[in-house]
Image (tube, rainbow, N blue to C red):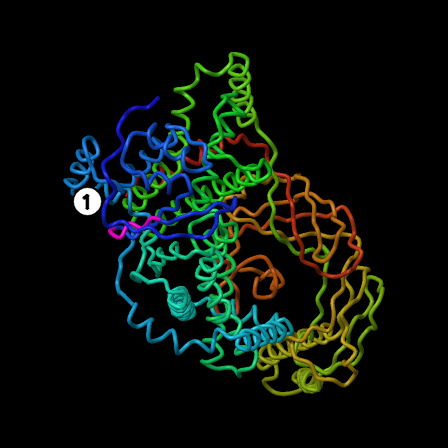
Amino acid sequence: MNEAPLPQALRQDLRLYASGPGADGGPTWAIQDPVSNRFFRIGWLEYECLLRWPGKPDEIAAAIEASTPLAVEAEQVADFARFLDLHQLALPSGDTRQRLLRHAREPGWRHWRWWLHNYLFIRVPLVRPQRFLDKLTPALAPLFTPLAFWLVFAATLLGLVLVVRQWEHFTHSVLDSLTPTGMLGFVLALIVSKTLHELGHAVVATRLGVRVAHMGVAFLVMWPMLYTDTGESWRLRSHRQRLAISLAGVSVEIILAGLATLAWALLDEGALRQAALYLATTGWVVSLALNISPFMRFDGYFILSDLLDFPNLHERSGALARIWLRRSLLGLPDAWPETLPSKTRRALIVFAFTTWVYRLIVFLGIALMVYFFFFKALGIFLMLVELVWFIGRPVWMEVAVWKKRWPEVHLRRRQLLHGGLAGLFLLALIPWPFSVDTHGLARAERQQLVFAPFPAELVELHAGGSVAAGATLAAFTTPDLLARQAQVLAGTQALERRLAGLLELDGGVNKQLALTQRLDEQHAELRGIAEETGRLAVQAEFAGQWRDVSPLLRPGTWLGVREALGVLIDPHSWVVDAYVEQRLVDRIEAGARVSFLPQNSVWALAGEVVAVDSTGSPRLPHPMLDSRHGGGFTTQPDGREATPREALYRVRIRLHDVPAEIREMRGSVRIAGKPRSLVWESLKGALATLVRESGF
């Protein structure tokens, strides 16, 4: 039995509030630490301990059992004592006082360790808005009525319907806004949206009687973001009221996005419509993609926690997942950290693993972000801190526990674990084929686009359909060319007559050379006119399908040189022009198998790689592949051409099958890549990065 005395009396400044029933129906309370403005939720057992504090664990346990139906062990009381000591809720004594003194003597933000631990997320309180909120909240009372809700809902629904009807124009407007000026507009819209978001939290909290301690700016890897301190919401007895505070920010952003969507659909082109576009896109994207995610400690996490009435969701689910790993992989008989139904426990374990994977992706993204957005030396340092401290350190701490308890693992299980790790390493070492996915345009390999050779009058146009090689597809005439031909022909005949009579004139022999030279020039011009006349009849270079002939073209129509009359294609041979990023080019070789899936189709066409360009494409030659026209590649305007934002290399593919529809079509391309080893590729990538970045 534990006879050790408990910590000294509780701090006199602590406050205790009755809270709503817990998930098991039992009563709960909240302890407020007014110094740090933190709240700690406790249950019935902990409350009974506080009533009898301080004392010895066995005496407190016996007193609780004597006066309540609770079955208590001394170790449970000791665990609660350690909790109070850890969070500095009891008066310090002994080792605790020494630890607090050491902590007080630390230099804090003046020491590099503080920045190492806290650079990821730093809070800077700016204002204490309670007086302002007390005046503002009554004025906003009409917005919390059912009528206001249904009006906003109807306006949002109407805006979404109107935008869907002009979806292509909306998406093009968003893409056209990705300019330096447009990005500034998105940033301003984000500031407005986030300010109203935090104000929504604060107003709802004030309506429910919760004091908003302060509002300020938090820096997430040096990126500023607003925040509102609503920690006192744990004073509320109803978790639904806490849920209302958590939902307030997202609700305000969605309302703002919905009204902005309607405004964009109704306004004419101009500055107001562009501002509505910025507010609509930032509101929908940030709310749906970031705020509602429960895997980071943003609104989505608190919303889910309040919906389930399950505080400390991340910590508790993580503890369950770590115990599950030890029990499943090592076979250790560790007890579960808390008693829960098996279905709930399994769901929390899955949630913890999902959170870890999500955070791994986010932290890796943050590491890359700090690497690319800061100057090179600082970027490399911060990236290493990110990888080591926030990814490697938690993994190593759990591995250290496994290492310490390794002797407890059964020999047979140790052999299985060693064999599994060796097998995974071999699998990573063996070269495996990895496909390269991209986008491409399928077209007939042989094509003949027909234009007027020069401004001319249409005389004849072949009807669409099958044509034989050498058939006349289009014929033209031009009065200017005929007039020039008649004029040059008359001049030629006149020169020939003069040459015939030179021998009869005195001095004619002397003039013969000059007239002969002029006659040769006239004959050359006649030949040039004949060649141009021959171009007035466009003939099929091969047998194929004559398509895309406009029904509006009639004989007698005058045409320019840029107006296409139709296209002749060979339907029996098809190629795909696919484009891949520079980092993927070395994975592709001639002869590789290809699968091309046309857009809006379920049947893929087989093919093979014919050639891979050795230089990047300076422009995207097929507008259908441009993201502004629904394609898969992002470009930036450069005069009349579209320049890819990333270097793209063309891969020429020949299809073995003929598409069902004889037309150009874009689609998804999957190319069988060269086999590669994950270990070898990782080593090459790391060495290449070291070589590339060693010159700063």
Left/right of residue 602 with respect to residue 70 in the rendered view: right
Residue 119 drawn at (x, y percent): 29, 47
Q: Secondary structure at mark 1?
A: helix
Main SS of the magenta part reads strand
Residue type at numbered disc 1:
Gly
Q: Which residues are magenta?
A: 31-35
Q: Nearer the viewer, residue 13 or 296?
A: 13
Q: Is residue 33 magenta?
A: yes
Q: Quadrant of the N terminus?
A: top left
Q: Quadrant of the C terminus?
A: top left
Q: Nearer the viewer, residue 476 or 102?
A: 102
Return the residue found at the far top. Answer: 411
Left/right of residue 572 with respect to residue 168 in the rendered view: right
Residue 491 drawn at (x, y percent): 67, 86
Residue 586 drawn at (x, y percent): 53, 40
Residue, disc 1: 108
Identify the image quadrant of residue 345. top right
| Residue in the picture at 55% in, 13% down | 412
Q: Relative to 55, does residue 462 appear above or below in the rendering?
A: below
Q: Is residue 401 magenta?
A: no
Can residue 544 be seen here?
Answer: yes
Left/right of residue 570 with respect to residue 297 in the rendered view: right
